Structure formats: structure tokens, C-alpha cells
Image (cartoon, rainbow, N blue to C red):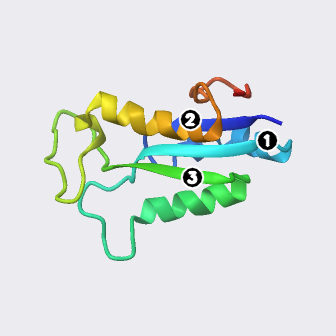
Amino acid sequence: MATVLAFHAHPDDEVFLTGGTLARAAAEGHRVVIVVATDGLMGAVPDGGAPRLTELRASAALLGVQRVVHLGYADSGHGAVLYPDPPDRARFVRADPEEAAGRLAAVLREEGLKAPLPEGSGFSTLQG
């Protein structure tokens, strides 16, 4: 069986954009991994952690996902306003591209993959 990795900007994108694909892959016996760039928060992470990451882990469990990875960035927001970074981490929009790519590449290497499952691609497994 193959490993399928879905990369998304935010927690909850996995359900809206690839939930059915990931559930199908898991049901067929594939290893399924979700990577998100941001924690979905505009401000500092509250005591107890980021609520949307908690929801992501619960969603992943229902989908049959074996691993969830957060790359460590804050949500960038949307629209014309670029908000300042929270005190504890950078917004994804301000991330150094090489650093962000390196974080994702590290997960790809750990999983033995060459590329993530692109959004909207349907069910296509990517094997190492």
C-alpha cells in the first residue's frame, strides 16, 4: 500500500477539500498523513493549545488518518490587511519560503514521499 499525504494551509481544509479522498485512501489500507501550515489562529496560542488543531486531530481520527503535522505557523488572515505576527510565531504569509519548504520536505522524507497530494487531484496515491 502507498502513503498519501495531503498538504493544506489551515485546519479544516482537510475535510472541505480532501476529506472523502483521505477517508477512501485510509479505508483501502493506505497510510494517510495530513500536513497543515497554520494552526488557524490569528493571535497567540491560548492555554490548552490551538482549538482548530484539536479539531483537526479529531477530524483526522474519524477519517482514518495515521499522522497529523502542523508546520508551526500562525494563520495569515485574508483580505487587504496584513496583520502583525503574534508574539509566539510567524504568520505563514511571512514565512521564509525556503524554511517553510524545508519543513514540508522533512515530512515528505520521513514518510518516504516525493510530493504531496495536490488539492483537487482526486484519488491518486503518491509512492516513495
Circle 1 sits on which residue?
Answer: 30
Q: Is residue 24 left or right of residue 114?
A: right
Q: Nearer the viewer, residue 102 or 95?
A: 102
Name of the residue lying farthest toward the bottom: 47
Q: Which mark is residue 68?
A: 3
Q: In the rendered view, would you say 37 is above or below 53?
A: above
Percent across and percent down for residue 19 are 66, 43
- At x 78% / y 40%, what residue is drawn? 25
Q: Considering the numbered disc 2 on the image, is that residue within a helix, a strand or a loop?
A: helix
The mark that comes first in sequence, 1 or 3, is 1
Q: Quadrant of the C terminus?
A: top right
- At x 78% / y 46%, what residue is drawn? 26
The mark that comes first in sequence, 2 or 3, is 3
Pointer 2 with pointer 1, Cβ within 8 A: no
Q: In the rendered view, would you say 92 is above or below 118?
A: below
Q: Considering the numbered disc 3 on the image, is that residue within a helix, a strand or a loop?
A: strand
Name the residue type under label 2. Leu
Q: Nearer the viewer, residue 109 or 74?
A: 109
Percent across and percent down for residue 88 are 22, 59
Characterize the local packing of mark 2: few (<14), some (14-19) or many (20 or more) Cα atoms within 10 angstroms.
some
Q: Considering the numbered disc 1 on the image, is that residue within a helix, a strand or a loop?
A: loop
Percent across and percent down for residue 121 are 64, 23
Characterize the local packing of mark 1: few (<14), some (14-19) or many (20 or more) Cα atoms within 10 angstroms.
some
Circle 2 sits on which residue?
Answer: 108
- At x 25% / y 44%, what residue is drawn? 91
Q: Is residue 45 left or right of residue 63?
A: left
Q: Quadrant of the N terminus?
A: top right
Q: CA distance from mark 1 to mark 3?
A: 15 Å
- At x 57% / y 60%, what residue is drawn? 57
Q: In the rendered view, would you say 21 is above or below 65?
A: above
